[in-house]
């Protein structure tokens, strides 16, 4: 028999820069609003086949090559916080505008966001919290590159909301804890079991 409690429906909200998961939303960070279709997680697990060439090139094993996680979401909140996050160097958070070209026009980020820069320089903690945290898991990226999706489009439509499609790439963060170092990447699980390192 199917366990109905194991069937997951997860509408929720996205946040960035969270610092305290025991606090009320936005958890010490910035609320990016509701996600139109929730979150899509791509594990992108890779493996390599090991063949026995002396036995007719048959597969005898597989070598695990790890994961290259990517997350996709569609944000409904068309505001200055979302614009400045997804269009760094082009968006003026004070005026709530997007201008292109804008990197040298006094917009947030300036030359730090010219083509060719390393995007990890503006990585940030990303959190997705479903409306029902009792039965559903959160998704916490301790260090993520958040950007406008390469295939994004913005519709000015009389019936459909104008949305922002975003790509989130979790990247490891080396966090010092005394003399020890640990890497924090991606957490998927209950809100009650999640922690953040504010460093």
Image: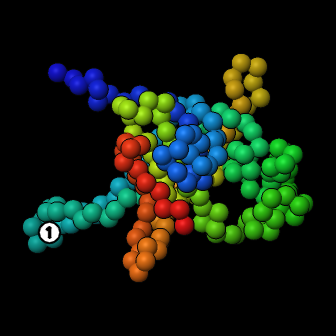
Q: Is 187 on the left or on the right of 118, as rendered? A: left
Q: Does residue 143 appear anywhere in the picture?
A: yes
What colour scheme governs how the chains and residues are painted in the rendered image of this protein?
Answer: rainbow
- Residue 55: x and y in percent read 9, 67
Which residue corresponds to mark 1?
52
Vertical relation: 59 (above or below) 136: below
Residue found at x 38% / y 32%:
134
Q: Secondary structure at mark 1?
A: strand
Farthest residue to the top: give it: 159
Q: Nearer the viewer, residue 170 or 129?
A: 129
- Residue 101: x and y in percent read 85, 56
Q: Is 51 on the left or on the right of 82, as rendered? A: left
Query: Could you tell me which quadrant the N terminus lies in?
Result: top left
- Residue 90: x and y in percent read 80, 54
Query: Could you tell me which quadrant the C terminus lies in?
Result: bottom right
**Residues packed near mark 1 inside 10 Å, few (<14), some (14 to 19) or many (20 plus):** few
- Residue 73: x and y in percent read 55, 40
Q: Nearer the viewer, residue 116 or 171?
A: 171
């Amino acid at each position: 028999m199917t366990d109905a409690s194991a069937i997951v429906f997860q509408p929720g909200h996205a946040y960035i820069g969270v610092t305290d998961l025991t606090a009320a939303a936005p958890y010490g960070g910035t609320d990016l609003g509701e996600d139109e279709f929730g979150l899509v997680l791509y594990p992108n697990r890779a493996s390599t086949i090991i063949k026995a060439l002396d036995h007719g090139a048959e597969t005898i094993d597989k070598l695990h090559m790890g994961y290259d996680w990517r997350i996709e979401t569609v944000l409904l909140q068309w505001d200055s916080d979302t614009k400045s996050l997804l269009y760094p160097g082009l968006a003026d958070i004070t005026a709530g505008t997007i201008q292109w070209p804008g990197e040298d026009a006094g917009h947030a980020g300036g030359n730090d966001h010219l083509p060719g820069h390393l995007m990890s320089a503006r990585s940030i903690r990303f959190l997705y919290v479903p409306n029902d945290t009792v039965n559903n898991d959160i998704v916490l990226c301790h260090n993520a590159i958040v950007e406008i999706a390469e295939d994004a489009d913005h519709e000015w439509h009389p019936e459909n909301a104008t949305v922002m499609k975003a790509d989130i790439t979790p990247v490891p963060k080396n966090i010092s804890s005394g003399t020890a170092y640990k890497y924090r990447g991606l957490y998927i699980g209950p809100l009650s079991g999640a922690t953040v390192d504010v460093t």
